Image (cartoon, grey):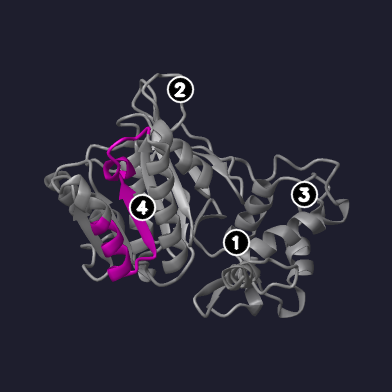
Amino acid sequence: MEGTECTFDRLQKQRILPSSAIPPHEFLFTWHDIPCFARGELVAVTGKAKSGKTYLNSILMAAAGISALSRGGGVWHLLGIERIREEPLTVLWIDTEQSEDSTHEILRDRIGTMIGEEPSPERFYVFNLRQVSLKDRELMVETAIYCYQPDLVIFDGIRDIVSDINDYAEAQRVIGILLSIASDKHTCIVCVLHQNKAIEDKTLRGALGTELQNKSFETYECSKDDDRVFTIRQAATRKYDIPYKQKFIVNPEGLPVQFAGEDSPSLTDNADKRFNTAYLLPDGHFDQKKLFGYILQNGRRMALDQLRQVVMKVGNIKSFNFAGKLIEEAKLQGLIGQVYENGQKYYGMCEQTIF
C-alpha cells in the first residue's frame, strides 16, 4: 500500500491542468521568420547519402555562433535561418561519420567563413568520435552535453551509438535517453540519420529511424538533384509549419549559397476577397501602416509568435507563412522594428522602438 501511495503521489506531479504554469516552447532560430528548433526537444535531419545534411548543420552552427555585430551585415544570410537570441549560442558538435581532417576543415574554413571569424573555443565544442569504440560513444555524448551544457547539439550521426539499427528495444532506450537529456538541460539536440537506400523510400532507416521520427519535434529533409542543386525542406513538425523550400548550391570555395534560380515568394500576391477589407488598399494589397499601426498602437510590443497570430486574426489571414511575409515586408519598409528585452526579441512601431 505504501508503495502504491508513493506512485500515486508521483503520478499527481505529472498531471497537466488548464491552470498549470508551464512555460511555452523556446526556439533557437527562425527560418524565414517562422520559429524552429525548440529547446528541450529532438530534431531529425535526414536525407540520402551526400544530400546536404552537413551543409544544413553548418548553417545552423554558423547562425548560432555569428556575432551580434555582424548579423545581417555580411554576405552570408545563412539561407533565411536567423538566431532569435541576440547573444551567440553555445554549440556542441559530435561527429561520428567524417574524418578528423574533414571535421576540422568544416569548422575552420566553412563555419569560420560564414561567421566572419575563427569559431570561438568558448562557444564551439567539437568532437570527432569516429575512432572511439561503440561502447564508449554513448557515454561520451552524454558527458559532453552535461559538461558543456550547450544551447544546440549537432549529433552526426546517431546511428553510431547503437549496434543494431533495427533493434526496437535499443532504439527506444537511446531515443528516450536523448529526449530526457534535451529536456533536463533545456537544449535542442539535432539528430542526423540517413533515409533508406531505395530512391523512392524517404523513411528514416531502421527501428532507430522510426523511433526518432515518432519522438522528434521537427524533421528536416535534405536532397540533391542531378544538377547538384540542394534542397532543404521541413518534412514534419509538431508546431509551426514551414512550407518554404530552400534551394542552394555550393560555390567554388565550398560554401552554401542560395540558388540563383530560386524565386522569392511574393509578399502580396496572396491578397484576395477573404481578407479584412478595412486594411486593404484599392489595389488589393495590405495597407501595412494601417494594419500594424492598429495592432501595435499605444507603444504595444509583441513577440514574433504573438504578432503573427494577431496579424492573422485582424487581417483575416489563413496562411501562417503569408502573415510572416507581411511582418517581413513591414520591417523592410521601416514601419516596425525589433527590441531585445531580457534576451528575447519583440516588435513595435519604429517610432516607439528603442534600438
Q: Label 1: few (<14), some or many (≥20) within 10 Å?
A: some
Q: Is residue 63 above or below residue 274?
A: below
Q: For residue 72, which numbered disc appears in the image? A: none
Report the amino acid beneath label 1.
Lys
The residue identified by callout 4 is 76
Report the amino acid beneath label 2.
Asp
Q: Is residue 353 above or below residue 247?
A: below
Q: For residue 317, which numbered disc appears in the image? A: 3
Residue range (magenta): 139-166
Mark with earlier residue (1, 2): 2
Left or right: residue 343 compared with residue 280: left
Determine if residue 156 is in view: yes
Left or right: residue 103 compared with residue 334: left
Report the amino acid beneath label 3.
Ile
As helix, strand or loop, the secondary structure at mark 3 comes to: loop
- Report if residue 112 lies within the magenta region: no
Q: Label 4: few (<14), some or many (≥20) within 10 Å?
A: many
Between 341 and 75, the one lying in front of the other is: 341
Q: Is residue 253 above or below residue 122?
A: above
Residue at 69% x, 45% y: name it.
Answer: 268
Q: Quadrant of residue 350?
A: bottom right
As helix, strand or loop, the secondary structure at mark 1 comes to: helix
From the image, state whether disc 1 or disc 2 is nearer to you: 2
Between the C-alphas of marks 4 and 1, the distance is 19 Å
Asked if the residue under mark 2 is in contact with the one under mark 3, i.e. CB atoms within 8 Å, the reply is no
Between the C-alphas of marks 3 and 1, the distance is 19 Å
The residue identified by callout 1 is 331
Q: Quadrant of residue 288?
A: bottom right
